[in-house]
Each structure stands twice: as structure tokens, then as C-alpha cells.
Image (cartoon, grey):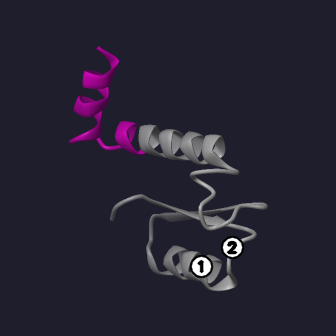
Amino acid sequence: TTPTLVLAGGADRPEYTGSGQYLERKMPDARLVVLDGGGHSMHEDTHAIEVATLVADFTAASLTNDDDLGGSILEEFQK
């Protein structure tokens, strides 16, 4: 299975947060993070730094946990 980060804004429409909850239940390696006060475009405005940090941390963790692919990619970026 593939690790998946699902982000939702706590101030977004309920159906979007509900979709995130559905994905987390149905996808074995999904992780849902609901950012308090975040709206639908939180990655562009109110929570840009938090979203970028979550994505970077999640990606780095996913790459280092994947011996076949992640290690070689991560090593390339660290050169």
C-alpha cells in the first residue's frame, strides 16, 4: 500500500472533511490531518506554512521508509 496524506480544513465545507474521513477509513496507509480554521484554499493562504511542513515531513518519512525507492531519491536530494 502507498502512504497517503489527506489534508482537510476544519473551517471548510463538511463534505470535504467527510471525504477525508472516508479516505482515511478506506485506505490502509492514509493519514488524515484536519487543520483548525483552515478553509478550502488553506494551502495558498491561511495555513500555507503548516501545509508545506506537513507535506515535507510526510514525504521525507515516506521516502526514508521505502528501501527500494525512497533511499536512493533521498540520497540524491541530500548531495
In the rendered structure, the answer to whether residue 46 lies left or right of residue 78 reads right
Q: Main secondary structure of the magenta part?
A: helix
Q: Secondary structure at mark 2?
A: loop
Q: Residue furthest front?
A: 45
Residue 26 horizontal/vertical position (percent):
47, 81
Q: Residue at x 41, y 58 (%)?
A: 3
Residue 76 horizontal/vertical position (percent):
25, 23
Give the answer, above or below, for where 52 lies relative to 6: above
The residue wearing badge 1 is 16
Label 1, residues with CA under 10 Å away: few <14, some 14-19, many ≥20: some
Residue 77 horizontal/vertical position (percent):
31, 24
The reply to whether callout 2 and callout 1 are in contact (CB within 8 Å) is yes
- Report the amino acid beneath label 1: Tyr
Q: Which mark is residue 59?
A: none
In the rendered structure, the answer to whether residue 30 lies left or right of residue 45 reads left
Q: Residue at x 43, y 43 (%)?
A: 59
Residue 56 horizontal/vertical position (percent):
49, 39
Label 2, residues with CA under 10 Å away: few <14, some 14-19, many ≥20: some
Give the answer, above or below, for where 73 lies relative to 32: above
The residue wearing badge 2 is 12
Count the marks: how many?
2
- Report the amino acid beneath label 2: Asp
Classify residue 11 by image quadrant: bottom right
Asked whether 60 or 18 is in front, the reply is 18
In the rendered structure, the answer to whether residue 18 lies left or right of residue 26 reads right
The N terminus lies in quadrant: bottom left
The C terminus lies in quadrant: top left
Q: Residue furthest right?
A: 37
Cα gap from disc 2 to disc 1, whole angstroms: 7 Å
Q: Which residues are magenta?
A: 62-79
